[in-house]
Image (cartoon, rainbow, N blue to C red):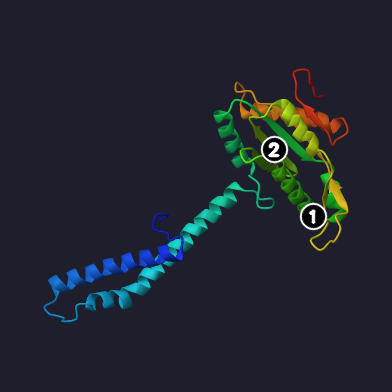
């Protein structure tokens, strides 16, 4: 069905012409073998196909376009976070795993919005949603095209930095701990609220699973929270979380 779907007005006309041509041939064959009536008009079968079969061909093509676009929309919704447009948890894990297979070097960042509940409680859920959207926009601006960004739950985000050393990841992480300003409502004229991020970082190790890396990054993130928030902590073997 995706092959038949027209992607432009020219493609729609071309598929319509093909459909009318097939109907014309079918009309001719049927009349040739089933009817004794001889029609002098050599364009009769073409005109018959256009006026009788044409509307049905257009209807069928329209249904195809609708179904394929609906399938694409549903596929997108199943892979993206509806609020921020980032990869959801499942898609992030899949994409990050593929990046890890392609490249041995990289780093994983786990980020969490500081005191997010206070924003919801004090300013309402709309302000919380706008806050998350502002965070997602900041993350997308801070990474490269090959990097993977996702919202993996609530106010928690993750980034897999491809071909990045842990030192480079630390520089990016420190930049992301700076306050992110946002409007409390869609109608606000001033960005009088801000949020900071705590970050846990871990260097990619091919011998560890992505789940193990996430667990280490989570330990580093926990330490960043415990040490005062708005900071980055890089996981190491000496890092012990109580």
Q: Reply above or below: 60 against 121.
A: below
For marks 2 and 1, give the CA distance.
Answer: 22 Å
Picture coordinates of residue 77, whole percent (x, y): 59, 52
Q: Determine whether label 2 and label 1 are within 8 Å by CB.
A: no
Q: How many marks?
A: 2
Q: Nearer the viewer, residue 198 or 155?
A: 198
Q: Quadrant of residue 204?
A: top right
Q: Residue at x 79, y 21 (%)?
A: 240
Q: Quadrant of the N terminus?
A: bottom left
Q: Reply above or below: 231 against 130.
A: above
* Residue corresponding to mark 2: 158
Picture coordinates of residue 157, whole percent (x, y): 71, 40
* Residue corresponding to mark 1: 125
141 left or right, relative to 16:
right
Q: Residue at x 84, y 37 (%)?
A: 230
Q: Quadrant of the C terminus?
A: top right
Picture coordinates of residue 87, whole percent (x, y): 63, 44
Q: Reply above or below: 173 against 11.
A: above
- Name the secondary structure under disc 2: strand
Q: Answer with mark 2 or mark 1, whichever residue precedes in sequence.
A: 1
- Residue placed farthest to the top in the image? 238
């Amino acid at each position: 069905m995706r092959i038949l779907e027209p992607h432009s007005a020219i493609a729609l006309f071309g598929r319509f012409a093909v459909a009318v041509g097939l109907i014309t041939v079918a009309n001719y064959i049927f009349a040739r073998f089933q009817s004794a009536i001889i029609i002098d008009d050599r364009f009769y079968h073409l005109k018959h196909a256009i006026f009788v079969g044409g509307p049905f061909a257009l209807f069928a093509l329209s249904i195809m376009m609708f179904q394929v676009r609906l399938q694409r929309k549903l596929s997108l919704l199943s892979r993206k976070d509806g609020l921020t447009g980032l990869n959801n948890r499942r898609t992030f894990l899949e994409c990050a795993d593929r990046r890890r297979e392609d490249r041995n070097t990289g780093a994983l960042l786990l980020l969490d919005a500081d005191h997010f509940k206070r924003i919801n409680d004090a300013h309402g859920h709309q302000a919380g949603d706008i806050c998350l959207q502002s965070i997602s926009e900041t993350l997308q601006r801070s990474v490269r095209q090959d990097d993977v960004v996702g919202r993996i739950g609530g106010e928690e985000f993750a980034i897999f930095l491809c071909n990045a050393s842990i030192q480079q990841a630390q520089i990016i992480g420190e930049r992301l701990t700076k306050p992110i300003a946002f409007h409390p409502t869609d109608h606000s004229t001033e960005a009088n609220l801000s949020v900071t991020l705590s970050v846990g970082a871990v260097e990619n190790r091919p011998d560890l699973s992505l789940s193990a890396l996430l667990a280490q990054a989570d330990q580093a993130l926990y330490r960043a929270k415990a040490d005062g928030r708005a900071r980055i902590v890089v996981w190491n073997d000496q890092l012990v979380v109580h």
